[in-house]
Amino acid sequence: MSTATIETPRPEFLEVELQPAPPRRRRRMKRKTVNTIIWFVALLALTAVVLYPLVWLVFSTFKPSSEFGQNPGLIPANPTIDNYVKVVEGIGGTPLWRFFANSLFIAVMAVIGTLVSSALAAYAFARIRFRGAAVLFAAMIGTLLLPFHVIIIPQYIIFNRLELVDTYWPLILPKFLATEAFFVFLIVQFIRNIPRDMDEAARIDGAGHLRIFVSIILPLIKPALITSAIFTFIWTWNDFLGPLLYVNSPEKYPLPIALRLYNDATSTSDYGATVAVSFLALLPILIFFIVFQRFLVDGVATQGLKG
């Protein structure tokens, strides 16, 4: 007998050879890297353009008044801190901290008034059924199209007859009367997205509108309230026309009006002190926005969510 030798075929499929990446894939990776670099450079250039005015403002606070108009560059030729010394001392016998305190008082009261009145009005429009609600809501939205300058004269006449001119009441009182239609509409949209089942369950347990509003609605509309508070604080802090109309005493001036004292067209203007006060007035807004920007983004992001 002859023995047959059976040869096992060589498992070529087990031999894996490492081959370089195909040229098309390498070109795609290089193109993606180049696009990333281009986008990074473009965003960096855009950021530099946006931040340049703020950087110029910071460096200009160290310029003497004589350099303004002669040294348009970014770096001051003769840096000094005299501008901050003049600003801290105050102007017209009123210290700087007084202007800050006035602005802070007006802004805080405006935030409180806007949140309380807007939240109550929004709850009424969103949850309470009463005759004429649709007409009143449409009228409120229509006030957004009404320019502020149209009501300046009638509003001034009313406060003048009430002898409230040269006080803070004309700047604060309207905030407690739900006159900010934008914030009322914003909170209404949040409340409408909350399921009514929660209200009905609370009503079965004996809760009234006030208990439902405080215990259920307010905790759920926190993003809208924080967004309204941020915008109200910033707008009130930067308001110039309102205090210009109603506040006459220098010791009651907020910061935007106090800025005018350093730059008077009828006399010598201290540009260095004006820039320094402008930067100091900007600091609270920057700090406030940096601290609450997360809540602002959350409020805008949850605007489109449905309950």
Image (cartoon, rainbow, N blue to C red):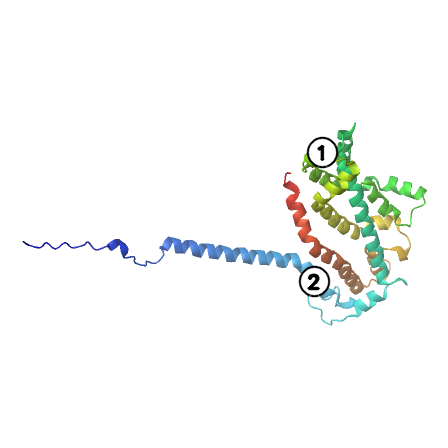
Q: Position of residue 228 (x, y in %)?
A: 74, 46
Q: Which residue is mark 2?
A: 56
Which badge, 1 or 2, is on the more N-terminal residue?
A: 2
Residue 251 spot, x, y in % from top left = 90, 57
Tell me the CA gap for discs 1 and 2: 57 Å
Please, what secondary structure does the residue beneath circle 1 have?
Answer: helix
| Residue 260 against residue 231 in the figure, above or below | below
Image location of residue 127, percent across then percent down:
74, 34
Mark 2 Cα-neighbour bin, 10 Å: few <14, some 14–19, many ≥20: some
Residue 42 at x, y percent in the picture: 56, 56
Residue at 82%, 39% (x, y): give it.
150
Q: Please tell me whether mark 2 sits on a helix, a strand or a loop.
A: helix
Name the residue at 45% across, 55% down: 31
**Residue depicted at x 71% and y 33%:** 200
Please say if 245 is above or below 145: below
Residue designated by label 1: 200
Circle 1 or circle 2, nearest the eye: 1
Locate residue 221 relative to residue 150 in the image: left or right: left
- Name the residue at 53% across, 55% down: 39
